[in-house]
Amino acid sequence: MSLVHVAGVGKMGLPMAGHFHVGGHAVTVSDLDASRLQFARGQGLQVADDAAAAMARADIIVSSLPNDAALRAVAAQVAQSARRGTTYIDTSTVSQQVSAEVAQVLSAAGMAYLRTTVSGNNKMAEAAQLTVMASGSRAAYDAALPLLKLLGPNQFYLGDAEQARLMKLVVNLMIAQTSAMLSEALTLGRKGGLDWGDMWQVLGASAVASPIVKAKSVQLGARVFTPTFTVEQMIKDLDLILDAGRTVHAPLAQTALTQQLMHAAMAQGDGQDDYAAIIKTVERSAGLSTELPQQA
């Protein structure tokens, strides 16, 4: 079994670290947020007193980070602190450009770098039901596969460079567009007098009942917008998606409109709600209340 250091134990990183620990690996963790380290201790994980020293001892370093700047910072620390031959696995949703920069830094330091993005929310991470999309060194991927299998039932190797970064954006584009589709469809139904609960029952049994629609149906059927992924976070991902489109000259007109709806949701105070809160944005634009009438 490997000595694994996990940098970043947020809503995704913490359950990942827990699965590595339960899988028999020796795991240490670090995070800039002391409250997240308290959660980690509560789950029996060993918090590193010195992240750099923990990286120097690790066979594999895994990170789950919020943005490009955080990846740059952690990768620089890995390059400076870890041993040659160490494998660095990053699971963050970041730009292809910064990820490619990090690849050069780590290659110069003699380290293998796997871009290992994941599809699924924090609940799926906790249940070890993530889909793993990896790119980078094939040899490093093959060696790390037993560890990656602890995260979920499906793993895909996509190539030797930034393919996993782009694939994650492709997936998240479709997730964002699903919320936009639902916002218009449900607003049309409400405006025409259909019952909110009835609509969700029919949608869940219909040809459009994709896994994500089914996953959202119970929560949204009850008009609960507690986030698995916030409006603010989705705006960040949509920025990355639209930047990727500009780079390869792919027209993403519908995605650009969805981004504007997300900004409207932010402006209306729903930024920390689930990204499906753009349903409320479209309802407001149609003159509907976001509070459903009480049933008699």
Image (cartoon, grey):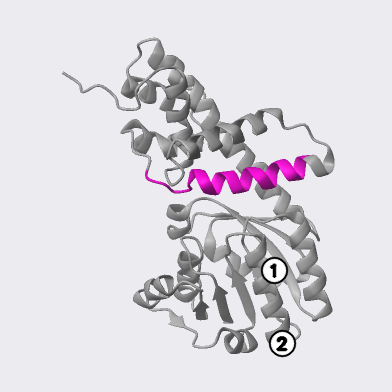
Q: Which residue is drawn at 49% across and 73% down?
A: 23
Image coords of residue 222 (percent x, y): 31, 33
Q: Which of 143 and 192 is in front in this view?
A: 192
Image quarter (top left, top right, bottom left or bottom right) of the C terminus: top left
Q: x, y (%) of residue 200? A: 38, 25
Q: Is residue 232 magenta?
A: yes
Mark 2 closeness class: few <14, some 14–19, many ≥20 residues within 10 Å: some
Q: Is residue 82 visible?
A: no
Q: Tell me the magenta residue range.
A: 226-245
Work out whether residue 286 can be spotted: yes
Q: In which quarter of the image is the N terminus?
A: bottom right
Between residues 73 and 179, which one lies in front from this camera angle?
Answer: 73
For residue 161, side relative to residue 275 (left or right): right
Relative to 12, residue 183 above or below: above
Residue 18 belongs to the span the image colors magenta: no
Image coordinates of residue 249 in percent, x first then y, are 83, 37
Secondary structure type for disc 2? loop
Give the image quarter of residue 117.
bottom right
Amino acid type shown at disc 2 = Arg
Mark 1 neighbour density, 10 Å: few (under 14) some (14–19) many (20 or more): some
Q: Is residue 296 above or below residue 212?
A: above
Residue 28 image point, x, y percent: 51, 81
Q: How many marks?
A: 2
Amino acid of disc 1: Arg
Residue at point 38%, 78% (across, down) = 41
The residue depicted at 71 percent of the width and 66 percent of the height is: 114
Q: Name the residue under label 1.
A: 72
Asked if the residue at tag 2 contacts the one at tag 1, i.e. Cβ–Cβ closer than 8 Å, the answer is no
Query: Seen from this angle, which residue lies furthest top?
Result: 192
**If you read the primary sequence from the N terminus, does the residue marked by circle 1 or circle 2 appear first?**
1
Residue under the point 49% across and 88% down = 49
Residue 83's tag is: 2
